Amino acid sequence: MDIKISCIGSGNMGVALMKGAALAAGGENIVFTDSDISKARDATKLTGSLLCSGNAEAAAIGDYVFLAVKPQVLRQVLEEIAPVLNARLADGKRPVLVSMAAGWPIQKIQGIVGTHPVAGGKQAYAPVARIMPNTPALISRGMIALAASPEVSPDQVTELETILGGAGHVDRIDEKFFDAVTGLSGSGPAFVYMFIEALADGAVRAGLPRDKALGYAARTVIGAAAMVEETGKHPAELKDMVTSPGGTTIAGLAALEAGAFRGTVMQAVEAAWQRSAELGKD
């Protein structure tokens, strides 16, 4: 791919996505910048990419400019790079902003960046794509939701899917679902890690060594998730396949129900969803 990619921010998610992007575009076509220069330098070593001087230079270089920063600092970054982006767009270039900030809708990002002149004396907004990846992208097994503004061409959306594909599965979805996606797949790995820890703790309590307990718990979750994905069966049907009358599984399920397991998990996703919506209003 003959493209340039800039990544503003070098945290775990930015690095994960750029490791995947390097497979498609080559590390030499990726640049990092960060307020913490040492972090950016480490990111270039991990991805085989290059270092640039700051956010404005990153915005001037990239065909795709990834915004891998916290929602709380996104406005500051957008205001800094807006003049560079709009100058490029006015000159006929087509850089795409790619935001992964929870709670920030495309329209809000475009409003801060502002408009640029186009033919006929009209004004146009910048092309913006919004993504919601999750931490398994660090091992190329992420779930990445993708939505794009009308200013992003179909070819650019396809190209962006290829860039992101090295970090996991990419799914195009209507932006109105992004807060729900954030609550589910964005925050969900943390819920699953807690579940794995709890499974292992239960096994340790029953006498299994800690290292064995963690291994069995992790592989149990991996295998169960694969069964859902590969069989296409409803989780309830798969659960019933494990559950014998008067057996061990139904005893464990009764304990989960007594502890309001399903309701608590639903509340966790809902709380994360609501917080995502709040971040867009802050």
Image: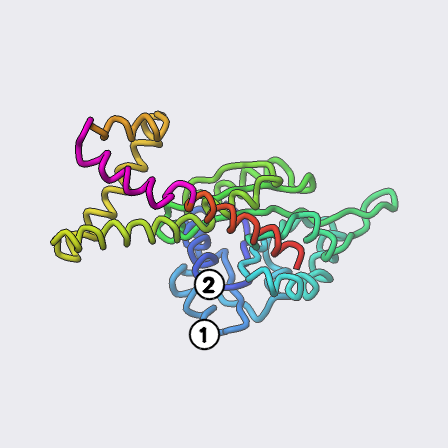
Considering depth in this image, is 9 or 119 the residue closer to the camera? 9
**Can residue 257 be found in the magenta stretch?**
yes
Q: Residue at x 38, y 53 (%)?
A: 138
Q: Earlier in the sequence, mark 1 or mark 2?
A: 2
> Which label is found at residue 38?
1
Magenta residues span: 245-263
Query: Where is residue 246 drawn, in percent x and y?
Result: 18, 30
Residue 87 position by quadrant: bottom right
Q: Residue furthest front?
A: 258
Q: Amino acid at mark 1?
A: Ser
Secondary structure of residue under mark 2? loop
Label 2 is placed on what type of residue? Gly
Q: Which mark is residue 89?
A: none
Q: Residues within 10 Å of mark 2 (few under 14, many from 20)?
A: some
Query: What x and y, as percent, mark residue 218?
Result: 25, 47
Residue at the image position 42 percent from the left and 48 percent from the top:
188
Q: Classify the position of the C terminus by image quarter.
A: bottom right
